[in-house]
Amino acid sequence: MSSLSRSTRRAFLKHSGLALAGMGLERASASGQAQASTAKAAALDPSTLKPFVDPLPVPKVARPEGLRANPENRAEKIPYYRIAAREVRVKVHRDLKPTRMWSFGDSFPGPTIETQSGQGMIVDWVNELPKRHFLPIDHTLHGAERSAPEVRSVVHLHGGRTPAESDGYPESWTTPGQVQTCFYPCAQHAAQLFYHDHTMGINRLNIYAGMQGMFLIRDRREDELELPSGAYDIPLLVADRLLDTEGQLRYPVSEFPERPWVPEVFGNAILVNGKLLPYLEVEPRRYRLRIFNGSNGRFYRFSLSNHAEFQVIANDQGLLEAPATVKRLPLAPAERADIVVDFAPMAGATLTMVSDSFDILQFRVAQKGAADTSRVPAVLHTPAVQLDETNAARTRRLTLDERMDDVQRSMGMLLNNTPWHAPVTEKPVLHTSEIWELVNLTDDTHPIHLHLVRFRILDRRRFDTFDYQSKGVLRFMGPVEAPAALEAGWKDTVRADPGMVTRILVPFEGYAGRYVWHCHILEHEDNEMMRPYEVLAAPEPA
Ligand code: C2O
Ligand code: CU
Ligand code: CU
């Protein structure tokens, strides 16, 4: 059934949702009248803009306001941050008017938070947003009913091993004027995490508006490797948007004014650290680029326009055991990868980081620079314990499902055919490992993310979706596929490909409590492709 329903759905989308009614200029609501009256400016075609006229901005690093007591050890004082979410105007390109966005601090992306492994912190996330949303809320979605306040926010630290009370549960939102206080212990490996809005039913809109930023954990072990650092270690937040000729954000809507939700959003304006088609002047030496796909739904395949190889040294949860040398880096929404590019052989050249047909970022390599003393060792990281899947306490088979209405339109996706509000079904025990088999019955790749934990990808294997749906039988149709070298490290988000069983091995470490797991395509997540899960406290030894 899938391929037919898929093409029907595609045809439907072409004729409706992705035709892009203009949204979001003035006060937008789900009513057709508001949509029509806000359709002022035409869609922007970014190829009409002069490329590479703006230097790449690097978000500033957040500064603590002072010290507070560590909630786990009152005698210790830890850094205290206060970061406000508010409306900002962002110059995304020299020749565009400033774009209205919602961000943290006074720019988009918000400030980068940096800490050392084991150095905890307190963050007060202050909601200073306006009272009305400027993107099209779908009030039929769970959590976004008309009875709920229009503007709500809750911040989650993606990839953080965080106590449940501080994790940013989707229903624990604040309204303008309120504060969410979080304790982040950061007792975990050096890695590139990120923070973002996670509000039930509107997180796709809040993040599209700009509510995300980067969060870097460093540690001594990594510093000792002498990887490129300081000015040669640059975070890149890549996120696509649709803009109009006035430089304002557009978020597409369906043809149904009462149900504006669309199943996916792909922008043709790809922002890097908030700039459209920026350039970066580099020295002819090694750089560490920490790439984070912060898009709602776009997948990238990054490469360099001169076809040069580069090394992947880390992914979601930190260093790989060994660098992987590649020419192309695939990155699904919410995935991160740190790459090292050696510009030394390219002195004097100009090249571009591209993804398929999109230009992303131009590099202008100087003729000369200071001596490069950095290196990329052949062994980056030696794991303390080898994970053994035979020690898993249990295996859970979990399906990824698409719901169709009677004319074969997508009504959204589900995890294990279960809506968000149904009772919790996944209850792993703290300090045990489980294998989760993600059985993808849909026609999309879904980047599946679990809060709290890090995991290993075991393998992927093609199966017969028809047999599974009609007889409930899992019949494999292909060989076991090991993860690619660049997926071999600790992950917190995994691509579950269509028609494949993707197996992950998850040690549940950190804290007991209520967390969530979900697809990180934000349109899916907001429409029921998210489930709570509960880590149960380990029983006391007898
Ligand atoms: Cu990036 Cu539920 O998170
Ligand atoms: Cu997360
Ligand atoms: Cu999905």
Image (tube, helix red, strand yellow):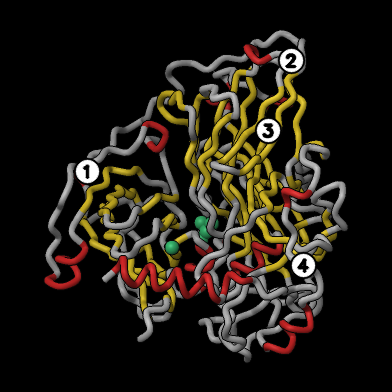
Q: Check disc 3 and give the amino acid type.
A: Ile
Q: Quadrant of residue 450?
A: bottom left
Q: Which numbered dot is residue 234?
A: 3
Measure how far apart labels 2 and 3 are at the Cα level.
Answer: 20 Å
Do the CB atoms of the residues marked 3 and 4 lie less than 8 Å apart? Answer: no
Q: Which marked residue is nearer to the observer: mark 1 or mark 4?
A: 4
Q: Is residue 137 above or below residue 497?
A: below
Mark 4 lies on residue: 42
Q: Check disc 2 and give the amino acid type.
A: Gly
Percent position of residue 197, x then y: 63, 63
Percent position of residue 161, x then y: 50, 51
Secondary structure beneath label 2: loop
Q: Which numbered dot is residue 336?
A: none
Q: State the quadrant of the N terminus.
A: bottom left
Q: Check disc 1 and give the amino acid type.
A: Glu
Do the CB atoms of the residues marked 1 and 4 lie less than 8 Å apart? Answer: no
Secondary structure beneath label 1: helix
Instruction: Inspect this view and state whether residue 540 appears.
Output: no
Do the CB atoms of the residues marked 1 and 3 lie less than 8 Å apart? Answer: no
Mark 1 lies on residue: 389
Mark 2 lies on residue: 348
Secondary structure beneath label 3: strand
Q: Which marked residue is nearer to the observer: mark 4 or mark 2?
A: 4
Percent position of residue 178, x then y: 74, 73
